[in-house]
Amino acid sequence: MSTATLQKTNGKSSAARPKQGKLPSAKAKIAKAKDERIDAKSPSPGRTDSFPIEQNIIGGRMVASASGETLPVIAPGDGNVFAEIASGTAEDISRAVTAARRAFEGGWGRLTAIERGRLLLKLSQAVLDYASDLAALESRDTGKPISQGKADVTALARYLEYYGSAADKLHGETIPFLNTHLVSILRVPHGVTGHIIPWNYPVQIFGRSVGAALAAGNACVVKPAEDASLSILKVARLALEVGFPEGAMNIVTGLGRTAGASLAGHPGVDFISFTGSPQTGTFIQSAAAQNHVGVTLELGGKSAQVVFADADLESLMPVVVNAIIQNGGQTCSAGSRLLIERSAYERVVEAVGKRFAALRAGPPERDLELGPMINAAQKRRVETYLAAASEDHLETVASGTIVKDAPKGGYYVPPTLIGQAPATHKIVQEEVFGPVLTATTFDDEADAIRLANGTPYGLVAGVWSRDAKRSLRVARKMRAGQVFVNSYGAGGGIELPFGGFGRSGHGREKGFEGLREFTTTQTLVMAHG
Ligand code: ADP
């Protein structure tokens, strides 16, 4: 059991409260290491700066990486190091998988569904009790504006509440068979589940994935993203404090190509849940295939907002803008393509452009519309797409601003609206993962459907029209896992199944579909005749 404690909401200190880090000499080296995903050994001999080191959580204990190595944690808002995390190895993953197996076959596995549910509900309450600290940490670690950090922590509590309440409502079926036999289909957990989590919504994705897996009775090994692990480590400590048996939830931090790859390919893991880039998704699925285990892949998106000329401009405006700037556009389900009926194009683009021009990017604690990108590589990626648009003479309709007092070392980019973007251009086809919205015209319903479905992705779509029949016709033709009519949720809704078509991945998370994903069935046939 962990001895670390957190301060309740509005309290001051936590066990390892991050310090402001100023590292003039080492900063450049460490930032480079992070950007290029190179292991950074630290603290290095003679280095006087010291940061809190957050350890792995394996079998209910906080432990250093088997290699003793750590990775720097950089605040995207200013580019400064403020903590260190364990750089997990294959050895750490093996220990975590062994601890999870022991829990699954032991204390955790023996609990009833009701008991598992109650623990998740307790954890949900603990998350709310410590919401301020968790939100501040999430915001600092990811760069998202503080109110978005708070919203993410509230969503985590709600995921835990939802899946905690659902644990004892997940039941099997009976099947008519021979009159001499009774057949039951039992819903059983996979066993040990691996969870590889990205940096854009750490606590939310932890909630929907680990919350569902635990409710279904699995024991978990979690590999958070190297860019944003801190909030997940804190939540796992809270889980120990509220009484989760040791080994039910194990956290190994570290790099994707070491800790992540070891988890994806570990023969002791029975199922993998992954959210991240399509490229990494391919690695994960290939690694899992070596052990013939299932995977859920929630990958990228290039989601379209289809706006017909009769749409209610006033109500769509804030939703359409928020759908691309939330979390700086670093959202798989960001509404990144605006498709507008030709007759309304000028009117809609002018109104959206006005809003874009008023957007500000700045430090997370200023709580503006946008924070920084997660790291220098992500900032470069967005800038590269904008440069390609400019080289090809695409029109920049409007850009927001980076506030003057934004620290120079932070990874800020201005939100940008690109007009008359050809549907075939890479900025329209590829996932930018930044605050860049493109606007393209369409001529009729068929054209709108063709363009909306005209990328390799299929995660979310929005349809805006006052004509209910047309909205439904178009919505049902969308190749997307979620379709919103006259609204848009960026994957929103804890209760709503979420996942992709095509290159956006497969499997479903959230809602009851997400819970079933963490189970398999066992057919039990009993002769009585
Ligand atoms: P991004 O490029 O946006 O960081 P990734 O898909 O690379 O997105 O990262 C999502 C998660 O996948 C992170 O936890 C990362 O460490 C992990 N990851 C990256 N590469 C691999 C890999 N080869 N095998 C397993 N996990 C990986």
Image (cartoon, rainbow, N blue to C red):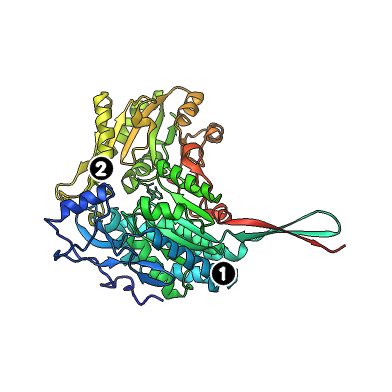
Q: Which residue is mark 2?
A: 379
Q: Position of residue 380 (x, y in %)?
A: 25, 40
Q: Position of residue 464 (x, y in %)?
A: 46, 35
457, 95: nearer the viewer: 95
Left or right: residue 318 compared with residue 78: right
Q: Position of residue 438 (x, y in %)?
A: 34, 32
Closer to the chain start, of discs 2 and 1, is 1
The quarter of the rendered structure image containing the C terminus is bottom right
- Residue depicted at 49% across the width and 68% down the height: 120
- Residue depicted at 44% across the width and 64% down the height: 96
- Residue depicted at 34% across the width and 59% down the height: 229
Within 10 angstroms of label 2, few (less than 14), some, or many (20 or more) residues?
A: some
Q: Dots 2 and 1: beta carbons under 8 Å?
A: no
- Residue found at the very far left of the displayed protein: 25
SS for tag 2?
A: helix
Q: Position of residue 105 (x, y in %)?
A: 56, 69
Q: Considering only vertical position in the picture, is 453 above or below 159?
A: above
Q: Is residue 292 visible?
A: yes
